[in-house]
Image (cartoon, helix red, strand yellow):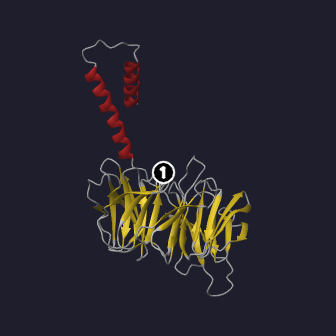
Amino acid sequence: MHKTMVFNEISFLNDLNKIRYIALPSNPDNNYMLFSIDGVIYKYDLSTKELCFSFKASAYRAMQIYDDDHKILTCDSKIVKIWEFEGNNPDLITSLPIEDKIETFYAPTRKTDKGSYFYIGVFQEMTGFKVYNNKLSEHWYCRDQLQVTALDFTSNCEIVLVGTKNGGTHLYDVKAKKKISDVKNGSGKSVSHINILDDEFCCVSTDDPAVYICQINDGTREPYKLDTIDQKTVCMQTSSDRKTLLLGFENSTIEFWKYRTDKQDFKLLKQIKEDFKVFNIDPLCTSMLMLNPRCRDIEFHIIEWDWNTSMIDQDLQNINLDFENIDDDFKDDEPDKNSKISNVKNKQRSQTAC
C-alpha cells in the first residue's frame, strides 16, 4: 500500500471545524471522494483534486452514499435528508424532521435490484430502533430493550444484524417486523462493529478487545476468535465479495485478513502502521481514504496485491485431479475420440505440456 495523494488544502473557519465523514463510491469507475465538514458536503475528483460540487447538508450524525452511488443520506440530531445526484447536480428528494434526538441513521449500502429500501434510525433517549421505508415513512418501531451500537444489512436489504451496548447480537426481519434469533458472539462486552460476510457468518468486534467470526443462522458453531487482537477496533470494513477484512485499531495499526471459505476462518495477510482516525475502502479493496487524527487532512492510498503463483499452481493441480476422477468414472467404457470428455482431457494435457 502506498500513498498517492495528501489532501490538505481545505480551509476551516475556526479550530472547532473538522472533517466528520469520508466516503468512496461503490463503483471504482467513479473516481471521486465525498467528505463532510459540519454543515457542508464536498465532492472532489481524485485525479485532479478539483472540487466537483459542494452543498449545505447537516451531516453531524451520519453521511452515507448508496444506491449505486446515486443517493446520499445525511442527518443531524433532528432531521434526516436524502439527496440524489447525477453528475454534479445534487437534489434534495426527501426530508424528515424527527422529534426524538437522533443518535445515528443507517442506509443499506449494499447494492440491491429491488428499488426499495429500509432505513434504520437509532435515538439517544430511546431503546430499540425505528425502521423507515424508502420514502422515510415509519414502517416499524422495534421496542426491544436494547441500545444499538452497530448494524449491518444482509444482501437482500430486508434482514439486519444488530449489535448492542450490553454485548448482544440479534437478527431481525425488518420487512416482516419481527425478531428472527439471537446470535452468539463470544463476548459480553459492547459491540463496536458488525460486518455480515455471507448468509451464514458475520464478523463482530467488541470492546474486550476482540474480533469474532459468528454463525448467523442455526448457531451450532461456537464463535471463532481471531488471533493476535489485543487493541480496541476503531474501524472495520470488508470488500464487496466479503472475503477481505480490514481492521483498524486504536494504536494506529491496520490489519488485512483474508476469509477462507473452506475453513470458515480468517488468515492474517499483512499488518501496517499508519497515523489515522478512520479509513474507507472501495468495494474491490484497491484504494483507501484515510482521515488523520486531527480530522483535517485526508490521504489517498493505493492498495497493491501480490498474487501468489502457488495458489494458481494449486488450482491447476485440482483441475488435474478432477480429470483423473473422470477417468476413474469412465474406465470401463471405451473413450470416444469425439466426446466432450476426451476433447477436454486432450486440451488439458496439451495445456499442461505447454
Q: Which quarter of the picture shows residue 66?
A: bottom right
From where the camera sits, is residue 297 visible?
Answer: no
Left or right of 67 on screen, residue 167 = left
Q: Quadrant of the C terminus?
A: top left
- Percent across and percent down for residue 161 are 42, 60
Q: Residue furthest bottom?
A: 15
Q: Which quarter of the picture shows residue 91?
A: bottom right
Label 1: few (<14), some or many (≥20) within 10 Å?
Answer: some
Q: Which quarter of the picture shows residue 184?
A: bottom left
- Percent across and percent down for residue 128 are 45, 69
Q: Amino acid at mark 1?
A: Ser
The residue lying at 69 percent from left, 64 percent from top is: 48
Q: Is residue 338 above or below residue 109?
A: above
Q: Is residue 6 above or below residue 1?
A: below
- The number of discs equals 1
For disc 1, the marked residue is: 155
From where the camera sits, is residue 36 visible?
Answer: yes
- Percent across and percent down for residue 185 are 32, 63
- Percent across and percent down for residue 234 are 44, 72
Left or right of 143 on screen, residue 231 = left
The residue lying at 70 percent from left, 58 percent from top is: 85
Residue closest to the eye, 292 or 162: 162
Residue closest to the eye, 230 or 317: 230
